Structures are given as structure tokens and as C-alpha cells.
Image (tube, rainbow, N blue to C red):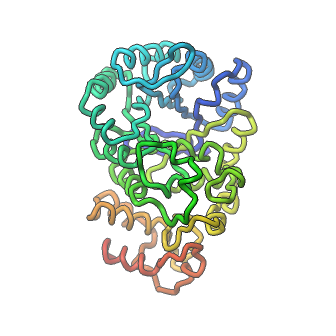
Amino acid sequence: MEYRVLGRTGLMVSEIALGCEGFNNKSEAEADALFAQALAAGVNCMDVYTPNPAVHAHIARNISTCRDKFVLQAHLCTVWQDGQYKATRKLDEVKASFAAMLENLHTDYVDIGMIHYVDSPQLWAEIAEGPIMAYALAEKAAGRIRHLGVSSHNPKAALAAVESGLIDVLMFSVNPCYDLLPGEEDCDHLWDAESYSGQLTNMDPEREALYETCQRLGVGITVMKAFGGGDLLSEELSPAGRALTAVQCLHYALTRPAVACIMAGVHTAEQLAASLAYTGATAEEKDYAAAFASFPRIRWQGHCMYCGHCAPCPKGIDVATVTKFLNLAKAQGEVPETVREHYAALDATGSDCIGCGACEKRCPFGVEIRANMAAATELFGK
């Protein structure tokens, strides 16, 4: 298992982490078996969106001996009523539900307190300026929340939250189909077949800007919906018209800027094994570029996907990384200090490019790599 730093939190999280939806309606034995499988593979992080006390009991039982090493991302604004989950913005319900969660989990803190399901800029403004944020900040000051986060499917709302400076972590839906669609308040459109009925080309610029802004500001991203609810794994259901493997979906998300881990939704040992297979997958198994290039309704022409097909460079340039730093600087409109220093630390930079064009011949997406290397040289210097 590989571990990554979750933005400015400094937390080290496993690339593959656990979503909790699959633990609903599980017996003790079933839940314990899934946890044993995950922990044995090095998983050290979990998202806990549900207020279901039975799921909390499963989690508490299984992390009791490793709580100080296990990263819990738990949600505010969810409550358990009449045997089911619902979202709420009522402060008294939020307070009572969070207190009950801590008690159920047998812990006095959560590593990330995630404000749940903020899918419109208006809702974010209401939360940021209202009593829920005041309560979350008070819980953070008291040590019961170590870092604040927001979960969202909407890049507009998410960007507003990230730029506010109030949050350290963003939970966002990241996969190659959702990344094509503009943000809106109705997240159902993300998995509506009609949204993909026409020709789609390249990533939505608001989503690209969101990932780059998170990278620049040190807001770590934890990923949900990496498999599009499982649709991307089925040729029949995939909006792209082709099936991807779990490993390809995971690698796509993990190569986006600022992404630290995937909260993999698993219901069975087989599904968990398919996600954990990423840890031992070969470069060929992780490669999503050839699959993307074959999609009948989606194109990424001229757009760097950070897939690495351009390698090897005869001068040793990590083309994908240079391009990522170039895009981060372009998004900012200037060269941030951290980006400049990371660029300068590279063994080879854009200025080492000899213009041979071998990389462009290998690129599945027709990216003008030589032009990007020249732009990086002009922007960062030699």
C-alpha cells in the first residue's frame, strides 16, 4: 500500500480507503471480515457518512486497537431517524447526531469533520456564514474535529468552499465521465444517460480549475464515486460506451491534482479485492489512456491526461509533471512559490527539451508537448 499526504493536514492516508455504504446491513462477521481484509492490506482511512449506529458499532469494534493510526473522515449534517439516514441543516440535530457518532465510535475526536453534501454555491454561502460553520469551528477548537472538510458533487460549490480558507479537505466525485460535465445543483445528472448522449470533448474547465486550486492551496481531495456507482465497470452501463477496470478508474482519480485517496465503496470481499489489486497492479494494468482513446462518444483531444504515455524522454523529463506544474501556474495567473520550488527540484525541466517530438508521437491525445515545454521554460525560466 502506498500512502499520500492529505494536503495541508499532514495526515498520511492510504491510497485505497474505505467507503462505509457497503457496511450497511452487514452482520458482525461480515463486517469484521471486510475490515480484516482491508487492514491487512494497509488501509488506514475510512469515510463515515452514515449516522447508522449499527455501522458505527462495526467500525468501533474493528479500529479499537489502531484508533490513533486510523484516519476517520466523518460527516456532520446527517441524522438517523426512523431507522434511516437523512441530511439535515438544523443545528440541534447536527449537534446531537455528531455527539452520538463520537459515542458510538468510542472516540473523542474525528480526524476530518466533513460538512455533508454541499451541492450549490448558495448552500455553501449559507453554511459558511451561519451557525453550522460556527459550530464546526468550535468543535475544531475543542479538538473533537482535527480538520474541516466539505463533501460535494458540484465544482462551483466546491471551489467556493476551497477558496474560503475554511476547509482543509474536499470530498469530491472524481471519474473520467463526471469530469466532462459542468457543475449544477442536480447531481442526478452526473449518472443520467441523457447527459452523455452527445459528443463530449475534454474535461469541464471548472472541474479542472477545482483540482488545480486544491493543489495550489493545499486542500487535499478524498474521492467518492470513482467507479460512477459501478457503471464505469460495465460496458452496458458505462456512459462512455466502454467498460473500464477498477484499477484504471482508481489510477485516473489518483493522477488528478491534489487527490490523496479513494474512498472505495465495497459491498463484498471480491469488490474490496478488486480495489486493493491497485496496490500490486502493473503500469500496463493501470493504463487508462488506450481505453479513453477508444471511447466512441468521448474525446480528450489535445488535453494532457497525465497518463505518462509520452515517456520515456531521452533527456529524462517527466513530461506529465512538468505539464501539471504548468497548468497549476496558468490557473493561478502567476507562479505560486510552492509550484516554483517543486518545479525547480525536478531532475529535468522544460528547458531540457531538445524538441525531438518522440513524446508527441506516443501521446494518445495529440497534446502539443513541445509547445508546453517551451511555455514552461518561458514561465519558470531555465
Name the spot of residue 70 as percent of width and height, x first.
Answer: 53, 29
Tell me: residue 211, above or below residue 126: below
In which image quadrant can residue 373 be found? Answer: bottom left
Residue 15 appears left or right of 344? right
Taking depth in this image into account, of 369 and 228 the one nearest to the observer is: 228
Name the spot of residue 126 as percent of width and height, x first.
Answer: 28, 33
Outermost residue, left direction? Answer: 129
Name the spot of residue 298 as percent of width and height, x first.
Answer: 57, 65
Q: Would you say residue 254 is visible in this rendering?
A: no
Seen at 47% across and 86% down, the residue is 355
Taking depth in this image into account, of 380 and 375 the one nearest to the observer is: 375
Seen at 37% across and 61% down, the residue is 328
Seen at 28% across and 41% down, the residue is 165
In which image quadrant can residue 169 be found? Answer: top left
Tell me: residue 342, above or below residue 143: below
In which image quadrant can residue 314 be found? Answer: bottom right
**Which quarter of the rendering shows the C terminus?**
bottom left
Tell me: residue 158, above or below residue 327: above
Q: Would you say residue 234 is visible in this rendering?
A: yes
Seen at 66% across and 59% down, the residue is 241
Taking depth in this image into account, of 91 and 15 the one nearest to the observer is: 91
Name the spot of residue 261 as percent of width and height, x first.
Answer: 53, 44
Q: Count all numbered tags in the image, as a single digit.
A: 0
**Which quarter of the rendering shows the N terminus?**
top right
Taking depth in this image into account, of 142 and 300 the one nearest to the observer is: 300
Tell me: residue 271, above or below residue 280: above
